[in-house]
Every structure is written in C-alpha cells, then in structure tokens.
C-alpha cells in the first residue's frame, strides 16, 4: 500500500505534537517553537510533483539591506532543503521544493528541523544587521523610562555603552 505525501506530513506533525491546520487536503500550516525567533510558521503544500515548503522569517529590513541580503545568500550555500528568499516587499522567507518520491517521515522531520534551525539561528543576526537603529532606539527609550530591557538581552554586547 502506498502512503500519500499528505499522510506522511500529517503523521510527522502529529507525532511531533506540533500545532497544525490542514486548510485543504494536502495544505498544512504548522508552528515551530524556537528560542530566538519564538515561533516560525511553516507551510507544506503537496502538489502534483513536489511538496513546497515556505516559512516567513523577518520583515523587510529597515536599513543595511545589501549586508542583510548578502549574509542570507552566503548562508544559502550551506543549507539543506530550503533557501532564503526575498519577496516583492523585501520580506525574508525560507522556501524549498522536495519531490514527492522523497517524502518520508525522516525527510519531513529533517525539513522541519532545517526550517526551524535556519529561521531561529539567523534571526538575531538579521535583526542586528537590518534593524540596529530601531533596536538601539528601543533600548534607549526603555532605559530612560526605567523599564526592563530583558527582551533585548541578545543584543547587550553592542547596545550598552562601554
């Protein structure tokens, strides 16, 4: 008996206890919990020839676009299954396609792991490169009001005056 790609994806999402929806047969959306990027929503869409993988990573950088996009392109050389992409607005995504014959529980798990790892491990660097001015303003505003800067701890090394 041949198991469909949709059945395999559904099985892996369920076994990994991930919250997901199946908006229509073969179209899945799941939330992957992270550490730096607290949640990455990934969609898996079963097509006639392949499964498309798509995840939003970050919005269009406020500044330093060239450095952000160059860093993403350099990362693409070392990645598995998905690659960074930029949409018409400049927002940053992870995208990939996997042939239907390659869809196994191990492969789906590996793809989900890759999406989570790449989104989570790149998030702070994307913020540092593309949103430094906004982060610095937020930090200064919080300090001036005596408010917590805990959510900015990842950037303390370059935020705090020396």
Image (cartoon, helix red, strand yellow):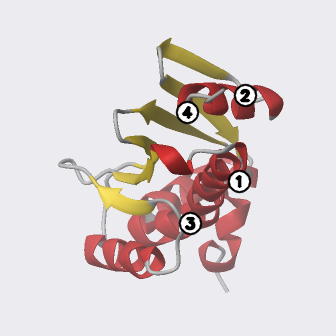
Q: Nearer the viewer, mark 2 or mark 4?
A: 4
Q: Is residue 60 visible?
A: yes
Q: Which residue is mark 4?
A: 5
Q: Are marks 4 and 3 in contact (CB under 8 Å)?
A: no
- Label 1 and label 2: CA atoms lie apart by 41 Å
Q: Earlier in the sequence, mark 2 or mark 4?
A: 4
Secondary structure beneath dot 1 equals: loop
| 138 w.r.t. 156: above or below | above
Q: Which residue is mark 3?
A: 122
Which residue occupies 56% across, 28% down?
A: 4
Which residue occupies 43% across, 32% down?
A: 45
Residue 63's spot in the image, x, y percent?
Answer: 30, 66
Q: Nearer the viewer, mark 1 or mark 4?
A: 4
Residue 11's mark?
2
Q: Nearer the viewer, residue 59 or 141?
A: 59
- Label 4 and label 3: CA atoms lie apart by 29 Å
Q: Earlier in the sequence, mark 4 or mark 3?
A: 4
Q: Nearer the viewer, mark 1 or mark 2?
A: 2
> Taking 47 as reference, is 106 left or right?
right
Q: Nearer the viewer, mark 4 or mark 3?
A: 4
Residue 150's spot in the image, x, y percent?
Answer: 76, 53
Q: Which residue ends up furthest to the bottom in the rendered image?
A: 162
Q: Earlier in the sequence, mark 1 or mark 2?
A: 2
Q: Earlier in the sequence, mark 2 or mark 3?
A: 2
Q: Which residue is mark 1?
A: 149
Q: Earlier in the sequence, mark 3 or mark 1?
A: 3
- Label 3 and label 1: CA atoms lie apart by 21 Å
């Amino acid at each position: 008996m041949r198991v469909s790609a949709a059945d395999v994806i559904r099985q892996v999402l369920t076994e990994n206890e991930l919250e997901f929806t199946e908006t229509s047969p073969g179209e899945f959306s799941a939330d992957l919990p992270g550490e730096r990027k607290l949640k990455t929503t990934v969609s898996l869409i079963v097509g006639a020839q392949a499964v498309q993988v798509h995840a939003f990573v970050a919005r269009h950088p406020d500044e330093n676009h060239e450095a952000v996009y160059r860093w993403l392109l350099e990362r693409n050389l070392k990645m598995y299954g998905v690659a960074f992409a930029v949409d018409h607005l400049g927002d940053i995504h992870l995208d990939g396609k996997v042939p239907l014959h390659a869809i196994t529980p191990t492969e789906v798990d590996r793809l989900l792991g890759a999406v989570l790892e790449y989104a989570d491990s790149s998030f702070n660097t994307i913020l540092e490169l593309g949103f430094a001015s906004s982060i610095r303003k937020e930090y200064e505003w919080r300090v001036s009001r005596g408010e917590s800067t805990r959510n900015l701890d990842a950037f303390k090394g370059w935020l705090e005056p020396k």
